[in-house]
Image (cartoon, helix red, strand yellow):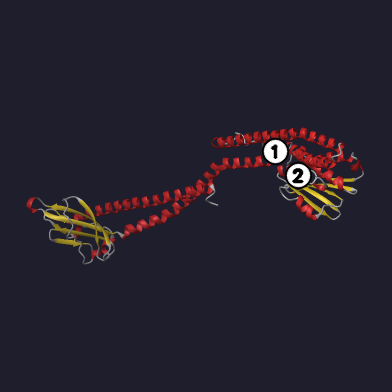
């Protein structure tokens, strides 16, 4: 389903892009935070180096611990993670937190006196330390004594700060991702709404609610709508031309068939009865085919968009049949709600009902019933007679799809092919069945 859904594909692609971007942002922000925290830590260590420098008596270089102003109390707590160390010549002083450990790095390259250098080394308990150190000279000339100041802190402090930052950052980014994904999904829905509108209008075309899609759509989908409308125009034109060609062909056969029937009559007069009957049989079969094609040619090409009131068509056909001698002797019962409308052309439905009601009149003993009802989105037209019905074997042949139902020329087969074509053209169904005490035909088409 997702592979064939444009909405899901765009939504998932947008969500993947948002999550990827926020993930990379989280990594970048964490790196920036690490750099900021380390700069802040080095700034603090530098300030403490300056404080340590006050331990040195410059006139007679020596270390005076008593002159050290109060700093962090963790310097007095063994292995606290905060350390300092001062080396003046051969004399070394260090914070109590180092206990008996000396911060040295024999392999460290020398650096310029007066400059600051940061590095990483192992602490008294093997932990990683961030160390800031400065090399100075105390005194003048040859009497100058080297002064080495070192402050250090456990890098675990920086790691704890990073973990805290990530812990605060992840929920925020998760909420931001949810909001951005929701916004992206809404954007996709709003962006694809014109396509949904096109889909709805195509459905309206199918149901006959509108003749064409039209141009009152979003600018981006107007070319698609115009192409569909152009295709529909071409289809209707092709159907009209095909219908006209079919009608012309059927009309072209009518005159030769009439001449052929005239020749058959002359053969009767000359006594060639067998030959005349054979010619008449062939000519009548061809005549029925021509009549059928003429009826199919009259089926409206815009039938999907047409609608009518079946009750009106029923009453019109029954009114005509009642005037015929066979119809005047029957009891006609019509149950039809005039408010019901069906999705079919009125002339096509009148022709179909005419064929079915004429069959019912021809085979009924005394009564013909026509009922019209609506069930949901469908309209049902039921025509019943109290005749003898149709043999079951022949009934199965009559309702078989694709069979020319009018070729037998007798019984309920007359005109049923035309009815089947009309109903199929309206996207409906035709059902023929025997019932206790008679025969029934039912047309089912969509309600308007």
Tell me, yes or no, if residue 352 can be seen here.
Answer: yes
User: Of callouts 2 and 1, which one flags the residue occurring earlier in the amino acid sequence?
Assistant: 1
Q: Is residue 405 left or right of residue 200?
A: right
Tell me, yes or no, if residue 447 can be seen here.
Answer: no
Q: Residues within 10 Å of mark 1 (few under 14, many from 20)?
A: many
Whole-percent x and y of residue 182? 51, 48
To which quarter of the image does residue 77 belong? bottom left
To which quarter of the image does residue 300 belong? top right
Q: At x 83% / y 48%, what residue is drawn?
A: 411
Between circles 2 and 1, the one closer to the viewer is: 2
Q: Residues within 10 Å of mark 2 (few under 14, many from 20)?
A: many
Q: Nearer the viewer, residue 191 or 26?
A: 191
Q: Which disc is residue 26 wearing?
A: none
Q: At x 18% / y 58%, what residue is drawn?
A: 86
Q: Which residue is mark 2?
A: 417
Asked which secondary structure carries label 1, the reply is: helix
Q: Nearer the viewer, residue 60 or 438?
A: 438
Q: Nearer the viewer, residue 41 or 400?
A: 400
Alpha carbon of mark 2 to alpha carbon of mark 1: how far?
23 Å
Where does the C terminus fall, quadrant-wise? top right
Asked which secondary structure carries label 2, the reply is: helix
Whole-percent x and y of residue 447? 73, 44
Q: How many marks?
A: 2
In contact (CB < 8 Å): disc 2 and disc 1: no
Q: Which disc is residue 305 wearing?
A: 1
- Farthest residue to the right: give it: 329
Against 382, residue 107 (above or below) is: below
């Amino acid at each position: 389903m997702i592979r064939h859904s444009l909405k899901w594909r765009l939504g998932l692609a947008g969500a993947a892009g948002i999550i990827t971007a926020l993930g990379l942002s989280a990594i970048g922000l964490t790196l920036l935070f690490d750099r900021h925290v380390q700069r802040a830590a080095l700034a603090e260590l530098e300030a403490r180096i300056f404080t340590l420098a006050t331990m040195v008596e410059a006139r007679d270089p020596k270390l005076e611990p008593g002159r050290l102003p109060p700093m962090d109390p963790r310097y007095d707590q063994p292995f606290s993670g905060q350390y300092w160390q001062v080396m003046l010549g051969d004399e070394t002083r260090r914070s109590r937190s180092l206990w008996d450990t000396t911060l040295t790095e024999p392999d460290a390259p020398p650096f310029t006196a007066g400059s600051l250098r940061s590095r990483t080394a192992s602490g008294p308990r093997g932990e990683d330390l961030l160390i800031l150190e400065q090399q100075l000279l105390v005194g003048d000339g040859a009497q100058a004594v080297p002064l080495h100041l070192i402050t250090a802190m456990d890098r675990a402090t920086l790691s704890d700060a990073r973990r805290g930052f990530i812990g605060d950052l992840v929920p925020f980014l998760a909420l931001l991702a949810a909001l951005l994904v929701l916004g992206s999904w809404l954007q996709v829905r709003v962006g694809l709404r014109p396509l949904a509108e096109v889909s709805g209008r195509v459905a309206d075309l199918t149901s006959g609610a509108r003749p064409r899609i039209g141009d009152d759509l979003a600018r981006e989908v107007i070319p698609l709508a115009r192409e569909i409308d152009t295709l529909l125009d071409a289809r209707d034109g092709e159907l009209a031309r095909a219908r006209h060609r079919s009608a012309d062909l059927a009309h072209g056969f009518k005159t030769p068939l009439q001449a052929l029937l005239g020749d058959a009559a002359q053969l009767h007069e000359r006594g060639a009865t067998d030959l005349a009957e054979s010619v008449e049989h062939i000519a009548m079969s061809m005549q029925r085919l021509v009549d059928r094609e003429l009826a199919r040619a009259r089926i409206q090409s815009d039938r999907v968009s047409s609608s009518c009131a079946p009750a009106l068509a029923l009453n019109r056909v029954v009114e005509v049949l009642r005037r015929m001698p066979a119809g005047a002797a029957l009891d006609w019962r019509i149950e039809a709600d005039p408010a019901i409308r069906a999705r079919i052309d009125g002339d096509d439905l009148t022709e179909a009902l005419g064929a079915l009601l004429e069959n019912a009149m021809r085979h009924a003993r005394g009564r013909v019933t026509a009922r019209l009802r609506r069930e949901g989105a469908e309209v049902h037209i039921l025509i019943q007679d109290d005749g003898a019905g149709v043999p079951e074997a022949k009934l199965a042949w009559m309702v078989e799809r694709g069979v020319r139902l009018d070729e037998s020329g007798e019984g309920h087969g007359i005109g049923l092919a035309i009815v089947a074509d009309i109903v199929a053209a309206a996207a409906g169904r035709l059902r023929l069945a025997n019932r206790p005490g008679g025969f029934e035909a039912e047309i089912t088409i969509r309600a308007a």
